[in-house]
Amino acid sequence: MARHRGSGLRLRGVAGWPLAVIAVLLISTLGYVGWSSLGAMVERRADAEAASCPQGDQTLRIAAEDSMAAPLIESAQEWSATRPVVQDYCIRVEVTTHRSADVLRGLVDDWDEAEHGARPDAWVPDSLRWVQQLSEQRGDLIGSQPLVLATSPILLGMSEPAAHAVRLHGGLRWSEVSDLVEEPSGWSRFEQDAWGRFVLVLPDPATNPATGLALEGVLAGPDATGPVTSEALAEQGAQDTLGRLWRNEPREVPPTTREALTVLGRTTDPGAEAFHAAPVAEVDLYRRNLGLDGDQAPQTPIAGFMPGGANPRVEYPLVAINGGERDTTLSRATQQFGEFLRHRDQQRVLAEAGFRVTAVMYYPNPAPGVRWSTPDANLASADGPTSQELIESWHGQAER
């Protein structure tokens, strides 16, 4: 019997590999999208965590001398607004005004919050000398290297007629001051015989940094740029110089530089003045003449005269203070804030307040009585131990 072929159609089979490729591509795409979403979510969470500061907020309390307080407050507000993060803490800077002597005494003894408020985590005194004293008495409290924010040259504050006479008739160098005050008719050098002796007051250098720095200027010598050393201070010539300055002061010396300036601002007749000059930081004279220091401005501005030779200057440091609960965090915050203060725009804020800074050359105007003179050279300051020896030598003149 013959065989017949089946009449049904035979369907060709479909290959499976294209479907597998599609599946792989689909899985890969979904995986990439999922992984990207997960990565973005992690990044958003990390950003949110950083912005919210997982450890919370932390206040950096800075005690500052009055002259520094206003510019520091302005800069502190600007920096705090950026929400700076240090060791997972958001830092906010709070600046309060304190006399440097009070801060030193409070830190060396037990800090009295009832009298002074919260204990500071950092300090900007009106001289590097205060930090040196703290280092000598309680070195364990120094939490960072002092960072000098600004400087201010030492001037002789005088009535305008007195300063005019000195400028008009040859000027005066720091190295000449001790001989000048010894002369019974010192003002004759400046063709003002009727004014008699040139009387200089030097408020206690232990609490008035301008006095100590002025003494360094006198002791440095005509051509030296410092610093005054312990060996130089021990020489008889240096002791004789201090003796001349000491014994030619008036019987009553104002206890502070500010009080000396107040007395100078009461009269413009050098012949009637109890004294004619007092050392002062340029920024403090600027503030005094404008009444920015809390007292009424003098009717006639006090003139600032810069003697020739290497000129001493005040250095204004920022230093972290140990002893709190989070020393490491606040010490790092202090250093970061200090670097912020070195930015050009923040240096401008300090310059506008009357300080000398390195980043900008700017002098506020009006500035009655202040000429913003350029010194012949800057005198390098004595180190801490020598500064203390100078204070002790000055006090010792009473026994000679």
Image (tube, grey):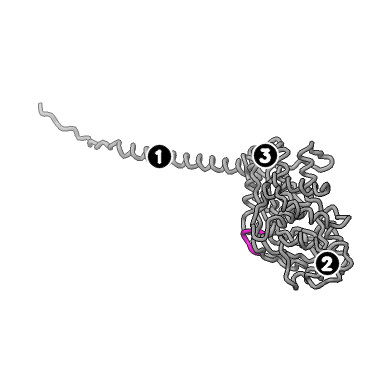
Q: Residues within 10 Å of mark 3 (few under 14, many from 20)?
A: few
Q: Which corner quadrant of the image does residue 248 belong to? A: bottom right
Front one among 231 and 68:
231
Q: Which residue is mark 2?
A: 185
Under tag 2, what secondary structure? loop
Q: Amino acid at mark 1?
A: Ser
Q: Which circle, 2 or 1, is nearer the viewer?
A: 2
Q: Which residue is mark 3?
A: 56
| Label 1 vs 3, first from the N-terminus | 1
- Could one spot residue 283 in this view of the protein? yes
Under tag 1, what secondary structure? helix
* Residue 320 numbered mark, or none: none
Q: Amino acid at mark 3?
A: Gly
Under tag 3, what secondary structure? loop
359 is within the stretch colored magenta:
yes
Query: Which region is colored magenta?
Result: 356-361
The extreme top residue here reads 1
Task: Determine the CA span between mark 2 and mark 3.
Answer: 68 Å
* Residue 28 numbered mark, or none: 1
Judged by its main secondary structure, the magenta piece is: loop
Q: Amino acid at mark 2?
A: Ser
Where does the image place residue 367, in percent across and percent down from the top left?
A: 75, 67
Front one among 67 and 375:
375
Which residue shows up at 71% across the image and 57% down it? Answer: 217
